Image (cartoon, rainbow, N blue to C red):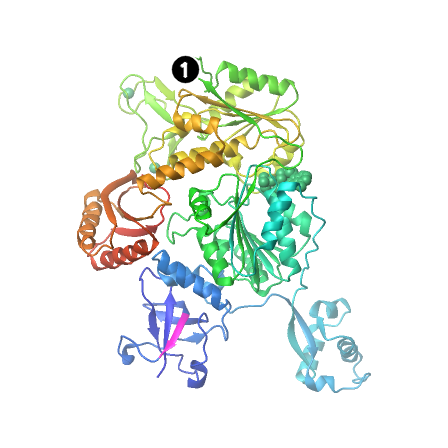
Amino acid sequence: MSVLRLAIASPLRRPFDYLPPPDMEPAQVITLQPGVRLRVPFGSREVTGYLLAVTRDSELELSALKPALTLLDPVPLVDARLLELCLWSADYYQHPVGEVMSALFPRALREGRNHQEAGETAWRLSIHGQGLPAGALSRSPRQAQALALLQQGDTVAARRFREKGISNAILAKLREKGLVENCLLPPPAERPEPGPGLDLNPEQSTVMADLRRSPRGFSCHLLEGVTGSGKTEIYLQLIADCLERDQQALVLIPEIGLTPQTLERFRQRFGGGIAVLHSGLSDARRYEAWEAARSGRARIVIGTRSAVFTPLENAGLIIVDEEHDSSYKQQDGFRYSARDVAVKRGQLSACPVLLGSATPSLESIHNALAGRYQLHRLTRRAGSARLPTLSALDLRRQELRAGLSPPLIEAVGETLRSGQQALLFLNRRGYAPTLQCHDCGWIAECMACDARLTVHRRQRRLRCHHCGAARRLPPECPDCMSQSLLVTGLGTEQSEEFLRQQFKQWPVFRVDSDSMQGRGAMQALVEEINRGQPCVLLGTQMLTKGHHFPGVALVAVIDTDALLFSPDFRGEERMAQLLTQVAGRAGRSDQPGRVILQTHYPDHPALQGLLRHSYQELAREMLERRRAAGLPPAGQLLMVRSDCADAGRGEGFLQRLREAAAEALPRGCNLIGPLPSPMQRRAGKFRSQLLLTAPGRREGQAAARLLVQQAEALPAGGGLKWSIDVDPTDVF
Ligand code: ADP
Ligand code: ZN
Ligand code: ZN
């Protein structure tokens, strides 16, 4: 008797055994391939399972196994390499394999719908019909006409019959006679037609030649190129090579809604054949794009994080743009890094992987220096643009208005008067981060989080930026009824208000997640800005993501200090990346830009590092310090987190886990904690964490398995959730 071993989306980290569907022949059962979907009973529900293997035995009594209900796919919809990627990911990230597998499929397929190939309904002659001579069926002219149409070509879309006034009923009659049959007319393959590439400058040419020279099969490349150095042009030309070899290219980008221009450039260069996958798609559109990628109809697949799992017919190249971007890491559920999974995918698919960034992650630089990745550099801006000059503006003893010092206000004015654009960066939305009572000291805090509520003046609300809670702006202090409430600190709304008053003749655009709601809002704004009229752009991190603003001559960071003091061990790396990226928005065309960093700590070593050195040099210094501290990318970090309404119980669970795991830990591993997580209370739950440092991947992987095994064996009790995060990013 054969047993079907299935992966099922469930928090349980084990496969589930079933008997084959009762009506299936044993001969068919043994030919089932891993990856096919089946409907199975699961508790009181019916769910979709994914075949991992057909085996002969089970840990359970065969009589205890339930039969599967139906087989959904005769052959797997995804290929063996993608399945292997899932198995690897489930193991590496210690996440239940069923949940990883279900992430492969669009919703309809996860829910057990039959797979529908894309295409329009059409008709063709049956074998019997093919034997008919031309001019047959002359006694019923409509049927004869339909037949004649089919005799001219192979397959004719149902639409074309309707256009000629031949109804479905006529075709149904022909089908009854066994002369015609239904089929699907696959949508025409959209062949991209690459337009001519730009003439590469000498640096680009060298990089391109090196990339082309790398041997067939897997290799991983890091393209470290300053902002505007022409990385995207390299991507485009590599993709053209890939298409030439008749293979597909997968391109990951951090965010699509915010960077419509990137997509536009791909469309302009290649015309058709591009499928786009991101979280904003409707289920139907997602299915369409997924199917186009899977069937090979789409030759270029562009997507955000989860697109790394898109099935491809013939992968020839994987590109991860802005590889340092934190949005590649999923922070809940299946906590994977799309960048790292992309590298693994390249390995399994024997195709090259290119990671690109102006500010590569220390992980990737480490891998490049260790020789695992080939390093390619672009040190100059493409075309005529020059890199901007950075300077610190000492805020001490300056009179600030909405966070802006007199010299900055003057610089913005000058920029506008000379017909250019200014971009101001402030990474805090809302009006102000604190509402405080001047009489008793009360501060508006979120009821569910360890966080203050942000004042949103326009909406007349207090909002929590962590759990989304919102309430009306109180007219008086709830504790002492005083009406003197102070609004302290600074947010984008407040700076916007000031800038509008100060620079009345010019438009001020605010760009944050409050102001940029709805599809196309960003695109419309980008178009407006790129018309080049003088204006002030004020925004959060949203503004820094890969935009090209050729008219921006001045960039200023209003609150550099907020970036300087982060407790996380990646704080300095993040700051350096962010400031370099913000600075990179300036001077994209022929005039060099100017970058002003407002700070109370002009001598802060991290800031000085950035002013004196390039990101490239600074990154290598930071890497040294990480090595000395034994922190990633030296060694590996794991985190087990508990999440519970009772703080003591969560921490107690981690304490017992620590004790249970301590003896069996691989050599060189250390446990830290349990400790309260940063912002311990969030949406009403208390979070604590146990960290593990391992000297290398091998030890880290063994420790991850051990921790999960031990945690599963511990009684957690209701209401306590725990999770493991392999290579966590926000730790301290
Ligand atoms: P990056 O991706 O590194 O930010 P891009 O590829 O977007 O850089 O290039 C920046 C700008 O320079 C774009 O406007 C692009 O069209 C232009 N550019 C890139 N390569 C060349 C080249 N070889 N010759 C002229 N202009 C170029
Ligand atoms: Zn008060
Ligand atoms: Zn909250």
Instruction: Specify whether 351 is left or right of 418.
Output: left
Residue 637 location (% of width, % of height): 32, 47
Relative height, residue 159 to residue 400 (above, below) = below
Relative height, residue 482 to residue 36 (above, below) = above
Mark 1 is on which residue type? Arg
Q: Determine whether the residue tagged by mark 1 lies in a helix, strand or loop.
A: loop
Residue 327 location (% of width, % of height): 45, 45
Relative height, residue 372 to residue 148 (above, below) = above
Overall secondary structure of the magenta section: strand
Q: Quadrant of the C terminus?
A: top left
Residue 560 location (% of width, % of height): 44, 26
In the foreground, 465 or 621: 621
Residue bounds of the magenta highlight: 51-55
Q: Is residue 53 magenta?
A: yes
In the foreground, 379 or 392: 379
Instruction: Specify whether 83 is left or right of 518.
Output: left
- Which residue corresponds to mark 1? 396
Decide: few, some or many residues near mark 1? Use Cα within 10 Å; few <14, some 14-19, many ≥20.
few
Q: Quadrant of residue 172?
A: bottom right
Instruction: Specify whether 48 is left or right of 12.
Output: right
